[in-house]
Amino acid sequence: MNFATLETPALILDIDRLTSNTTKMIARCADMGVTLRPHLKTAKSAEVAKIATGGRMGTVTVSTLQEAEYFARAGFDDILYAVGITPNKFARVERIQEETGKTIVLSVDSVDMARAIVDRGLSCPVLVEVDCGEHRGGIDCDDGAILEIAQILGPNFKGIMSHAGHSYSTDQITRVQQIAEDEVRAAVRAAEQVQAAGIMVEVVSIGSTPTVLHTNSLEGITEVRAGIYMVWDLCQVGRNMCSLDDLAITVLATVVGHNRKAGVLTVDAGALAMSKDIGTQNHMPDAGYGLLCDPHSLAPLNLRIDGVHQEHGTVHVNNADDFARLPIGSQVRILPGHACLTSAGGYGRFHVTNGEIWDRCDGWS
C-alpha cells in the first residue's frame, strides 16, 4: 500500500488482522452455541460488517440511527439500536423500516417508553434492558417493571438484553469472568421472570468483548453482542485482552513540525483524529494518546503523542536522533488508545491495506 499518496490524517484498516480477529470470534460463538450480533459502532462500515457476520446480512448492533439507516440501506436486516429509544426518534425508525423493508430492533428500560411505543403504533421488536452492574442503563433484574414492560409491549416484546461495560474496568481475567457470570445471571433471571408469566422470550442478549471471550458458560443466552474484538486498541492491550499484533486500526499521520528547543515534534493527528480519551493510561500508563509506529512495518518507534490540540499531536522526542529519523514530511502510523472514539473522529472512509477504500457512516443525521 502506497501511504505516501494519502492525505493525512487517514484511517488505515489492516484487512488481515480484521479477518483473523473476526474469524476467532465467529468460531468462539459457534463453540458456545450462541448467535453473534456484532456491534458496528466502531467500524461503521458495510464491508467490515460482511466480514464480521461471516457473510450473514443480518443480526447486527448499532449505536445511532444514522448507522441503522446506513446498514439497512446496505441490505442488513434485524438491526438492534442498542441505545434506549425516545419519542423524538420514532419517526426516523418508521421511515427507515418503510423505505428499506428492514427491521429495527429497539431497546427500553422504562414503563413510560414501552407505553410510548405502543401508543405510537410502532411495529418493532423490543428488548428490555437489564442492569448487570455497570449502572449505565437498564433495570434491576428482580424489578417487577420488567414483566410490566413485557406485558405492555405485547407482540412487540422480543426479549432481554444486558451489557457488562464495566468489564473494561479491570485487567484481571478472573474479575472479567466474575463480571461475565453476573451478566449472564442477570439476563437469564430477568428472562425467567417473564417466562414464568407465560410470555415467550425469544432473545436473551448480552455482550462485551471481554465477557464473551472469557465467560465459562453462556447457558440461557441466545446471542452475544461485541465489537472491539474486530479491530482492538491499546485499551484492550493494557487489559491483557489482546496483543499489539492484533490491532487492525491505525491512524496514518505526517510529521508537520520540529521544535528542537522544546524537544518535541508535531504530527497532524490531534484531538479530533485520535480523541482525547485517556482511559488507556489506567492500565497502560505510557500509551499517551497513541503510540507511534513505522508506517510500513508497524514497528514501535518508542514515541507517543503526549498532548493533543484540535489538529495537532505533540510528541516529546527521546533525543535529537528522533528529529533525524522523523523529518518534517515523514509519516507514522499511530496505534489508538480507544479505537471506537478514534474512528468516530470524522473519517469518511477506511484506507484498507489491500488497496481498497471502504466507505463508512459518521454522525447522527
Image (spheres, helix red, strand yellow):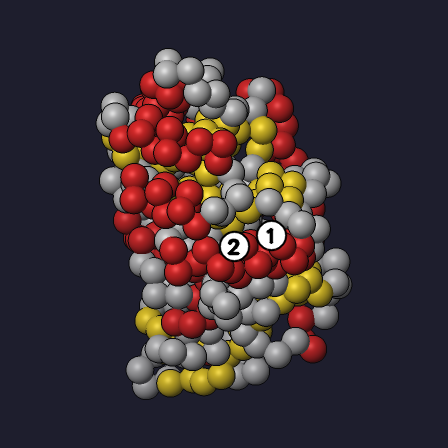
> Residue, x 57% and y 82% (percent of image)?
329
Q: Is residue 89 left or right of residue 74?
A: left
Q: Is residue 221 above or below residue 228?
A: above
Quadrant of the image containing the N terminus: bottom right
Determine the residue located farthest toward the right in the rendered image.
Answer: 355
Number of other residues with Cα within 10 Å of mark 2, as a class: few under 14, some 14 to 19, many 20 or more: many
Q: Is residue 357 left or right of residue 281?
A: right
Q: Is residue 168 above or below residue 27?
A: below
- Which corner quadrant of the image does residue 88 belong to? bottom left
**Kind of residue at disc 2:** Val
Residue 129, horizontal then vertical, whole percent:
36, 36
Residue 222, disc = none
> Residue, x 55% and y 46% (percent of image)?
104
Residue 93, disc = 2
> Could you say whether the residue bearing mark 1 is in a helix, strand or loop?
helix
Q: Is residue 218 visible?
A: no
- Which corner quadrant of the image does residue 261 belong to? bottom left
> Residue, x 52% and y 83% (percent of image)?
328
Closer-to-camera residue (347/321): 347
Number of other residues with Cα within 10 Å of mark 1, as a class: few under 14, some 14 to 19, many 20 or more: some
What's the distance in space between the residues labelled 1 and 2, CA to CA? 6 Å
Closer-to-camera residue (278/128): 128
Closer-to-camera residue (70/117): 117
Q: Are marks 1 and 2 in contact (CB under 8 Å)?
A: yes
Per the image, the residue denoted by label 1 is: 97
> Could you say whether the residue bearing mark 2 is in a helix, strand or loop?
helix
Q: Is residue 2 visible?
A: yes
- Which corner quadrant of the image does residue 341 belong to? bottom left
Residue 310, horizontal then vertical, whole percent:
38, 78
Q: Is residue 177 left or right of residue 71?
A: left
Residue 183, horizontal then vertical, whole percent:
35, 27
